[in-house]
Image (cartoon, helix red, strand yellow):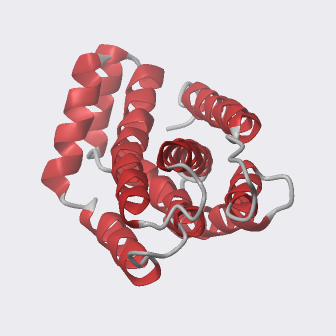
Amino acid sequence: MTALLRYQAALLLRSQRWLAPFLLYAAYVGVGVRPGEPVLGSLGYAVTGLVPVTAWAVRICLDQEPPAARTVVAAAAGRSRAHLAAILTGTGAVLLVGTLTALGVTAIGDPRGVGVLAAGAEGLLAAGVCVLTGAAVGALTTRPLILSRGWSVATLVLGSLLALVTAGSPVRTTVTALVTDAHAPAVVLPWPAFTVAVILSAGATALACRATAWRT
């Protein structure tokens, strides 16, 4: 698996297709986050953008290989393992960006009665929730489950939107908790939402990898 991850990461870096989602995310954070603003509110804003960015990055990794190269890799390592490596590469790249963003926002924000370490921990967990949920959206909205590029993009956008606004969604629950904790005497870490996000991501990834056995 290590070799597959290195292969996928090298493809992603060389393709430069990662520039679009990451630059847009940088602009999103740069416009909406200012030094000295309440740290939890700023974190709530910053992490929401990780959902569509992760879905986009996962889609890029699943689509970046030429068909011939994909066939060779699948023959050598197995379709499911190759598919899993692509999903993990896209997810890991955004998780790194999300972690750095959460730490940076925590450093420049105003704690306003909330401990910096507590705020940072909640921000990191919130980033994890959003990245994992975005990975689930990305895994379910591209090949092998959806082969049409147009429908793939449309369902990716819709899935990201639903993850952000649907009641009970781990993303919405986490962001709501961040805003609420900004006015509370103590921070409550969003472990339940994180657990749900892990389950959603694992289930979506397993489904997508299994589907490679009958549809490419």
Residue at the outermost front position:
113
Q: In front: 110, or 76? A: 110
**Above/below status of 100 relative to 77:** below
Residue at the outermost right position:
167
Q: Left or right of 100: which side holds 106?
A: right
**Above/below status of 114 relative to 8:** below
Q: In front: 95, or 119? A: 119
Q: Residue at x 54, y 49 (%)?
A: 115
Image quadrant occupied by the N terminus: top left
Q: In front: 82, or 190? A: 190
Q: Residue at x 78, y 53 (%)?
A: 169
- Is residue 68 something one can see in this rendering? yes
Q: Left or right of 64: which side holds 14?
A: left
Q: Residue at x 67, y 37 (%)?
A: 194
Number of marks in the rendered image: 0
Residue 144: give x, y in percent of width and height: 54, 42
Residue at the outermost bottom position:
31
Residue 213: give x, y in percent of width and height: 55, 24
- Is residue 144 something one can see in this rendering? no
**Above/below status of 57 relative to 206:** below
Residue at the outermost left position:
14
Q: In front: 31, or 50? A: 31
Residue 116: give x, y in percent of width and height: 48, 50
Quarter-of-image position of residue 113: bottom right
